[in-house]
Amino acid sequence: MQTIIFPTDFSKGAKYAFDFAVAIAQKTGAQVIALNAYDLPYAETIMTHSLLDVMKKNAEEAMEKVSEQLKEAGVKHKILVQMGNPIRVVKEAVEEFKADIVVLGTKGASGLEEVLIGSNAAAILHNVDCPVLSIPKGSTFNTVDTIVYGSDFRSKKSGKALRELKAVAELFNAKIIVTHVVVNYQIDKETIAEAKARISPILEGVNHTFEVIHAESVEDGLLEFAATQGADMVALMSKNYSFFEGLFHRSLSSKVAYHASIPYLALQEER
């Protein structure tokens, strides 16, 4: 792992993600690209330009403090403050720096609040071509021993996601529990056997097991199972959407990101 993108709005939630980004960087020697995007959704006026100038100055001052913290942690880093839509800024940074992972903070929400607050982070999950690790408020980094991976046993496009998952598991020497949640249907032994035969070779060298569980919803089943296993991280393959689809699509991946009480790893579907 060489490059970590850390988007920050300087909130308390971002501070929890900062700790994870630093821990991964210290473990791998990766560079952290800390970035802040500021923008105003108004027409260009003199007042707007003045506000943008103030926002830029405040962001640059706050980012200097982030830089000092990264320096104190002994982490290689670069800071970026850019005007623009946060989703596009992160996506462009991932592409420019060929990032290996994005680490960001999330804020739990529900209902309409989930749609509004979650739109930026949810769109990032679906619009970057690397894993996204979202850290819920209150998460304290210590170690990652167990990862629960929610798997669609029928998917033939999960190779990239599984390779990303394996890399993260190897980083922490973690065990993976490949979990398929059954909701209102039956799954036959042949489908399970085929899934194991397809997944195990990709995860070779990493301690992993398979579980099939039944629940009323995939989201609830996966999170409840992760809790019973004392998992330190939950992971899913994130579907690819266009920019605007990613803004408004409330996918399973997005919902889990905002309801998880442990770090959530969004892995990328093969394009």
Image (spheres, rainbow, N blue to C red):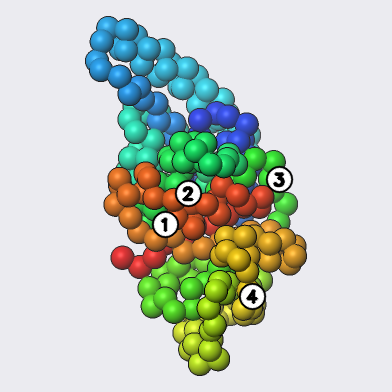
Q: Earlier in the sequence, mark 4 or mark 1?
A: 1
On screen, residue 219 above or below 57: below
Q: Nearer the viewer, mark 4 or mark 1?
A: 4
Q: Amino acid at mark 1?
A: Cys
Q: Which mark is residue 213?
A: 4
Question: Is 21 on the left or on the right of 38, as rendered?
Answer: right
Q: Amino acid at mark 4?
A: Ile
| Residue density around tag 4, few if under 14, some if 14–19, many if 20 or more, within 10 Å | few
Q: Amino acid at mark 2?
A: Val
Which residue is labeled 1 in the image?
130
Q: Amino acid at mark 3?
A: Thr
Q: Nearer the viewer, mark 3 or mark 4?
A: 4
Tell me the distance, in whole angstroms, between the alpha carbons under discs 1 and 2.
7 Å
Q: Earlier in the sequence, mark 3 or mark 2?
A: 2
Q: Which mark is residue 102?
A: 2
Residue at the farthest bottom position: 190
